[in-house]
Image (cartoon, helix red, strand yellow):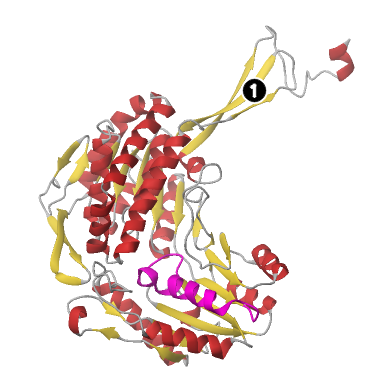
Amino acid sequence: MDVRNFIDGRWLDAQDGKRFNSLNPADTRQVVASAPLSGPADVSQAVAAARKAFPVWKLLPAPRRGEILFKAGDLLLREKARLGELVTREMGKVLAEGLGDVQEAIDMAFYMAGEGRRMQGETVPSELPDKDCKSVREALGVVGLITPWNFPMAIPAWKLFPALVCGNTVVLKPSSDTPACAAALVAFLEKAGIPPGVVNLVHGRGEVVGEALATHPGIDAVSFTGSCAAGEQLEELLGKLHRPLATEMGGKNAIIIMDDADLNLALEGVLWGAFGTSGQRCTASSRLIIHEKVYANFIAMLGKAAAEFRLGDGLKQDTDVGPIINAQQMEKVLKYIEIGTAEGARLVTGGSQVTAGDCGFGHFIKPTVFADVDPSMRIAREEIFGPVVSVMKCSRLKEAIDIVNSVPFGLSSAIYSRDVNATARAEKELQTGIVYVNASTIGAEIHLPFGGWKHSGSGHPEAGGRGGAVDFYSRVKVIYRDFSGRLQRAQIDKQSPSGILS
């Protein structure tokens, strides 16, 4: 499959003609797509197109902008099966998850389309007579969007659709591991009738295209999802430019399992949270804090279940866990497994690469469980982004909460307990942007904000309406209208109630 950049309504190659391939991580002999290896000149061309389109797009009424998103959502829904298979082939997650990835994009299209009729400000009374006060929302301008590979349909949709309904024009730079998925999403926006220049797509390497886009003088704001290292570098660069930036940078998410928990329910949540998407989620359940009374029993349950997972191509119905995205990420995960062993953690199951049979040409690592982990160990504090879970012991709820809160991240956490008072205390004291009660650390819904605290993110969260993406992709303008026909000075000329009523 050949994909191209999309600039000013045209599908184009990179100006220097260079290209790169995306590979199927389950079988790297298969080339999924060939894409342009773009450079700063291509970024400038895309930004210029977005700047040209912005004045007209922002004046199109927000409900009309929403109608285009409704059309895009409908088109995505009709092609969900085909797109889900594309996600699985290019990213590697099992087909059910690939379809879920596309469904998130569909949900976001429909939800944000509705926001076109809810783009409200507020009207409040003035403290002076014959004067009114209101606030309205306006677009930021041209927004740069930088997205990762682990949700190659959903996360671009999280950024594109709210940015568009708020009246911005955009330049999207997707991950170089998943260019075909991003191109497919943009193609549906084109079919839905998005005007030329409103949405632009530039493929290429993050260190070249991503940085050129984020720092381009024609960009008014940036939204980034990716690693902490890259996000913090952008924070430093854009802070000097006084440019709005929203970042979502990962987590070290924990599940607390208390002694009164439904252990079978907790096991299902842990398996899904730790090994779904092969652990390659920012909300992956990479830490377990288990009460000492059920610690040994639960580890035995978890080790047995994790060892029974079937690895392979996500398009095959009997596959439970798919591959790691690429060789570089696989080596990183294997290195952390070595670190965990060297630190003295007990390897319960997994811990190695799989190279036999159907896994012989892909990037596969066995689901890995470490027990007897100390909270100070690196595997308990650093994001691994792979199928590795670290298990720790606690004797009471406060100790468990303290362990959860001890890391630099604060994206997602969960607690399993039948004690309503314990769960109420946990949801209040856990220092994460998302808290789950008797559910895993993954599974956010798109109509609420999605984002973390501490090093997990900065700026406004993704998704949601008020308090989330709409607040980031629009800015508030306050308007005072005085129809008294005379100079009125707020705070100075404010009349007393008796003066007004006399």
Mark 1 surroundings within 10 Å by alpha-carbon count, few (fewer than 14), some (14 through 19), many (20 or more): some
Q: Which residues are magenta?
A: 258-284
Secondary structure mainly formed by the magenta segment: helix
| Residue tagged 1 | 133
Quadrant where the C terminus is found in the figure: top right
The residue lying toward the viewer, choosing from 443 and 405, is: 443
Residue 413 pos. (x, y %)? 55, 67
Q: Is residue 51 above or below residue 157?
A: above
Q: Is residue 108 above or below residue 475?
A: below
Q: Is residue 282 above or below residue 370?
A: above
Quadrant position of residue 88:
bottom left
Residue at the image point whose x is 74% and y is 18% from the top: 128
Please give left or right for residue 296 compared with residue 32 in the image: right
Quadrant position of residue 395:
bottom right
Residue 221 pos. (x, y %)? 41, 43
In magenta stretch: residue 45: no
Residue placed farthest to the top in the image?
485
Residue 212 pos. (x, y %)? 29, 49
Residue 320 pos. (x, y %)? 33, 74
In magenta stretch: residue 261: yes
The residue lying toward the viewer, choosing from 212 and 280, is: 280
Quadrant where the N terminus is found in the figure: bottom left
Residue placed farthest to the left in the image?
17
Please give left or right for residue 485 compared with residue 141 in the image: right
**Could you tell me which secondary element the residue under label 1 belongs to?**
strand
Residue at the image point whose x is 20% and y is 66% from the top: 24
